[in-house]
Image: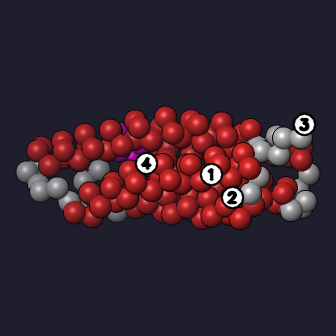
């Protein structure tokens, strides 16, 4: 039986599912801590971006896993674009937040690494599906 999915992409997606739980809990705790510690109201843009991540990331990971298993090139490209949006959100959290704690910076760096890696492997998988990259590179 010929398996067309990339196991490395699937392993990264599974690891990212687990990381997202830690990420969301860590970011929410950090947001509440900053609001209490620095006598600041909850920053609206940060709350909106966290809500975006809580709703968007599970959808992104589902699309990535499903398209990888089915070897669907179009949805792998959609997944790569969604990963790019997640990287941009992580970079925003790293660079342009007013008050940033070290744990938030670490979580956002890991998020950018996970999402960037997923996008890179998904693009290699798409190229392999259209026969531009040898199969040995994807495994």
Q: Using the rendered image of the protein, determine whether residue 49 is visible from the camera's viewpoint.
A: yes
Q: What element carries label 2?
A: helix
Q: Distance between the residues labelled 2 and 3?
A: 22 Å
Residue in view at x 51 percent, y 39 percent: 17
Looking at the image, is mark 3 or mark 4 nearer the viewer?
Answer: 3
Residue in view at x 74 percent, y 57 percent: 72
Mark 4 or 2, nearer chain start: 2
* Residue segment shown in magenta: 103-108
Circle 2 Cα neighbour tier, 10 Å, few/some/many (<14 / 14–19 / ≥20): many
Q: How far apart are marks 4 and 2 (CA)?
A: 23 Å
Locate residue 75, reporting x and y percent. Answer: 67, 61
Give the residue number, with chain letter if any, for mark 3.
1
Mark 1 or 4, nearer chain start: 1
Residue in view at x 82 percent, y 60 percent: 127
Pick the residue in front: 85 or 67: 67
Mark 1 or 2, nearer chain start: 1
Circle 3 Cα neighbour tier, 10 Å, few/some/many (<14 / 14–19 / ≥20): few
Q: How far apart are marks 1 and 4 (CA)?
A: 20 Å
Q: Is mark 3 on a helix, strand or loop?
A: loop
Give the residue number, with chain letter if any, for mark 1.
64
Mark 3 or 4, nearer chain start: 3
Give the residue number, with chain letter if any, for mark 4.
108
Give the residue number, with chain letter if any, for mark 2.
76
Q: Is mark 4 on a helix, strand or loop?
A: helix
Q: How far apart are marks 3 and 1 (CA)?
A: 22 Å
Residue 129, by quadrant, is bottom right
Position of the C terminus by quadrant: top right
115 vs 8: above or below: below
Locate residue 36, reporting x and y percent. Answer: 11, 44
- Magenta stretch contains residue 104: yes
């Amino acid at each position: 039986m010929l398996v067309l999915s990339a196991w490395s992409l699937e392993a990264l997606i599974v690891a990212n599912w687990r990381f997202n739980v830690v990420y969301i809990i860590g970011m929410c705790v950090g947001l509440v801590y900053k609001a209490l510690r620095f006598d600041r109201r909850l920053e609206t843009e940060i709350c909106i971006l966290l809500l975006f991540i809580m709703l968007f990331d599970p959808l992104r990971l589902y699309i990535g896993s499903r398209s990888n298993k089915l070897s669907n090139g179009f949805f792998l490209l959609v997944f790569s674009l969604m990963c790019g949006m997640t990287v941009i959100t992580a970079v925003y959290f790293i660079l342009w937040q007013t008050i940033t704690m070290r744990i938030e910076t670490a979580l956002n760096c890991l998020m950018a690494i996970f999402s960037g890696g997923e996008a890179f492997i998904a693009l290699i998988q798409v190229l392999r599906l259209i026969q531009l990259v040898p199969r040995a590179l994807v495994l």
